Amino acid sequence: MEIAKSKAPGELLNWDDIQKMKYSWNVACEVMRFAPPPLQGTFREVINDFIFNGFSIPKGWKVYWRANSTHKSAEYFPKPEKFNPTRFKGDGPALYTFVPFEGDPRMCLGKEYARLEILVFMHNLVKRFKWEKLPPEEKIVVDPMPMSAKGLPVCLCPHKA
């Protein structure tokens, strides 16, 4: 709302406004940590023999890695079940522990476009509407993707001018 209040009526967001939306991006990152974008994992080829949880994984094997293996890990994200956008302040989490857009050298080419689109959407949603969940205590189920049990009905009420 701070950015919205600084704009003249009808004035659109500009690049400088987007760069100031640090907390909004932290919120978006925390949402993606809770429910990673549709591709929740990927296959990788093992390049060195290693042991994981007592199992020997030989070089050349294909392994499937899931984002939730780090996104929901208390080792990397203290109290992982708690929604906490401040965990993305400053430098944010350790390298390769938060990967909704993969990581170098396989970083998604659309990451910055997605960031721009997410922030513009969030800005307009918050600026134009007050919203609340109906019912307020709706549960999230995983089947196989996280989703709200009843489709997440919300009440959107335009802000009064």
Image: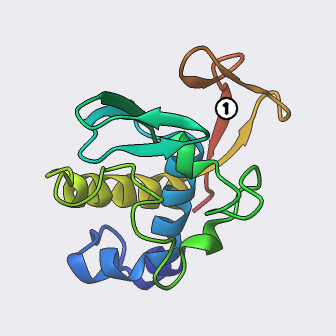
**Which of the pair 43/80 is nearer the observer?**
43
Left or right: 143 as drawn, with respect to 94? right
The answer, for residue 39, to whether it is visible in the render is no
The spot of residue 71 in percent (x, y) is 56, 50
Question: Looking at the image, can residue 158 be seen?
Answer: yes
Nearest to the observer: residue 16 or residue 72: 72
Q: Dot 1, how many residues are within 10 Å of its Cα: few (below 14), some (14-19), or many (20+)? A: few
**Is residue 20 shown left or right of residue 153?**
left
In the rendered view of the protein, which quadrant contains the C terminus? Answer: bottom right
Instruction: Give how far across and how far down residue 4 sits, in percent.
Output: 45, 74
Report the colour scheme: rainbow
- Residue 14, given in percent of the width and then of the height, sits at 23, 75
Q: Residue at x 60, y 45 (%)?
A: 34
Q: Residue type at mark 1?
A: Val
Q: Which residue does the image show at 67% across and 61% down from the upper left?
A: 75
Quadrant for the N terminus in the image: bottom right
Image quadrant assignment for residue 123: bottom left
Residue to which mark 1 is pinned:
154
Q: Is residue 131 left or right of residue 91?
A: right
Q: Is residue 149 above or below residue 64?
A: above
For residue 83, side relative to residue 57 (left or right): right
Label 1, secondary structure: give it: strand
Quadrant of residue 84 within the rendered picture: bottom right
Judging depth in this view, the residue of 47 and 100 nearest the camera is: 47
